[in-house]
């Protein structure tokens, strides 16, 4: 295991995002004092010269790669070029610069959408590249697969110490609550909150309500990143999930009960369902001694409290 101390310089790429901000909170709490961050205005990660210049100057010892172009089913589906281009450029620049500057630990983050659309459930890490992807987010997925393969290739050829983690659908404070471009959970929190305030009799839910999704609170993910940052150095990528899933209808009902909204659900079947089910097999991660703690109900309560305090912060 690489020895990194609490004063090691750690670059958290994407520190203003849902994942990056949770990583900063978790690492600071654990006593890491030398976190290096840059806003998008200060450093454009799609710009190769800028990224290499930054690494040469700052020379971080470790990197948590939480920067990516992300969005929900509609954003992914309607901006295929943006999603594949930005993600390929960002990760290629950061991984290569980190290797060239002698970074001793690199954590790459992917997504559960890298797996085949009809993968057997729960999805084991071994199912990668065994079937066609879900078309609504294949651009993002292809980029993320390239990223994790790049980490494996750099480890094999150059001995670069990169690990790859594949989180399930995430949510939590700092999420994007934009109604068109966000993921389902923040969209439902906002829509149900606004319906309650307006006194609407019903709210719209995209699709049929039957797809199943697994949700992990981002503070649990940050805790897993911290744990694996300290305890895991291997080529094998790891799923990070909660271990159970719910239907979109059940999710909407849970959000309604947290917000105390008593209207009806109306399913808008002109909108896509996406993949029917996406539940990660987390046996490997459990075997390494980590498990999540924040239940979906508690997590929604906490995220709703954050939303009421901060309002909608659309990021796309
Ligand atoms: P996915 O896991 O990549 O499909 O990402 P999403 O979180 O965007 O969507 C998950 C599921 O929730 C899909 O079946 C959507 O059709 C459904 N869904 C229901 N209402 C909404 C909504 O308001 N926004 C989004 N993004 N999805 C919704």
Image (spheres, rainbow, N blue to C red):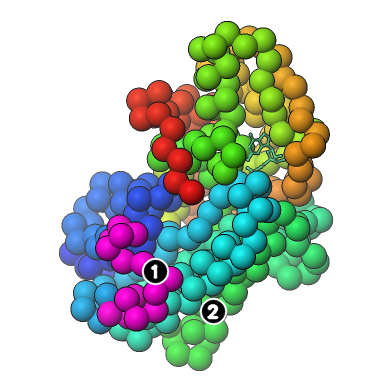
Q: Which residue is nearer to you in this view: 7 or 254?
A: 254
Within-10-Å neighbours for mark 1: few <14, some 14–19, many 20+? many
Q: Which residues are magenta?
A: 38-53
Within-10-Å neighbours for mark 2: few <14, some 14–19, many 20+? some
**Which residue shows up at 59% across the image and 29% down it?**
188
Corner quadrant of residue 255? top right
Q: Earlier in the sequence, mark 1 or mark 2?
A: 1
Ligand 1 within 8 Å of the CB at mark 1: no
Q: Is residue 46 magenta?
A: yes
**Which residue shows up at 67% across the image and 10% down it?**
201
The residue carrying mark 2 is 150
Q: Secondary structure at mark 1?
A: loop
Where, quadrant-wise, is the N terminus in this rendering?
Answer: bottom left
- Residue 223 image point, x, y percent: 41, 49
Asked if disc 1 and disc 2 are in contact, CB closer than 8 Å, the reply is: no
Ligand 1 within 8 Å of the CB at mark 2: no
Residue 286, compared with residue 206, is above or below; it is below
Corner quadrant of residue 153? bottom right
The prevailing secondary structure element of the residues shown in magenta is loop
Corner quadrant of residue 200? top right
Structural distance between the alpha carbons of marks 1 and 2: 17 Å
Q: Which residue is nearer to you in this view: 18 or 47?
A: 47
- Residue 228 image point, x, y percent: 43, 61
Q: Quadrant of ligand 1?
A: top right
Describe residue 288's horizontal placement relative to residue 125 as left or right.
Answer: left
- Residue 270 image point, x, y percent: 79, 37
Residue 214, compared with residue 108, is above or below; it is above
The residue carrying mark 1 is 45
Q: Secondary structure at mark 2?
A: helix
């Amino acid at each position: 295991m690489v020895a990194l101390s609490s004063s090691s310089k750690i670059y958290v790429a994407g520190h203003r995002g849902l994942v990056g901000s949770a990583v900063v909170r978790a690492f600071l709490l654990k006593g890491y004092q030398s976190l290096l961050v840059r806003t998008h205005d200060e450093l454009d990660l799609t710009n190769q010269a800028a990224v290499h210049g930054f690494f040469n100057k700052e020379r971080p010892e470790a990197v948590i790669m939480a920067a990516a172009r992300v969005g929900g089913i509609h954003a992914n589906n309607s901006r295929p070029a943006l999603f594949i281009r930005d993600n390929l450029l960002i990760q290629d620049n950061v991984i290569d610069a980190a290797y060239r500057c002698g970074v001793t630990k690199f954590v790459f983050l992917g997504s559960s959408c890298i797996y085949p659309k009809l993968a057997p459930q729960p999805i084991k890490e071994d199912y990668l590249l065994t079937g066609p992807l879900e078309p609504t987010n294949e651009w993002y997925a292809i980029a993320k697969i390239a990223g994790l393969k790049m980490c494996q290739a750099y480890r094999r050829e150059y001995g670069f110490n990169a690990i790859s983690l594949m989180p399930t659908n995430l949510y939590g404070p700092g999420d994007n609550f934009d109604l068109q471009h966000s993921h389902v959970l923040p969209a439902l929190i906002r829509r149900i909150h606004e319906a309650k305030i307006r006194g609407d009799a019903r709210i719209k839910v995209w699709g049929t309500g039957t797809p199943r999704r697994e949700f992990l609170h981002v503070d649990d993910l940050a805790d897993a990143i911290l744990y694996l940052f300290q305890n895991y150095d291997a080529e094998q990528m790891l799923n990070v999930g909660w271990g159970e899933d719910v239907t979109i209808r059940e999710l909407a009902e849970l959000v309604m009960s947290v917000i105390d909204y008593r209207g009806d659900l109306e399913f808008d079947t002109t909108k896509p369902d996406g993949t029917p089910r996406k539940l990660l097999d987390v046996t490997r991660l459990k075997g390494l001694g980590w498990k999540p703690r924040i239940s979906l109900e508690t997590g929604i309560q906490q995220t709703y409290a954050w939303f009421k305090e901060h309002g909608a912060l659309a990021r796309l």
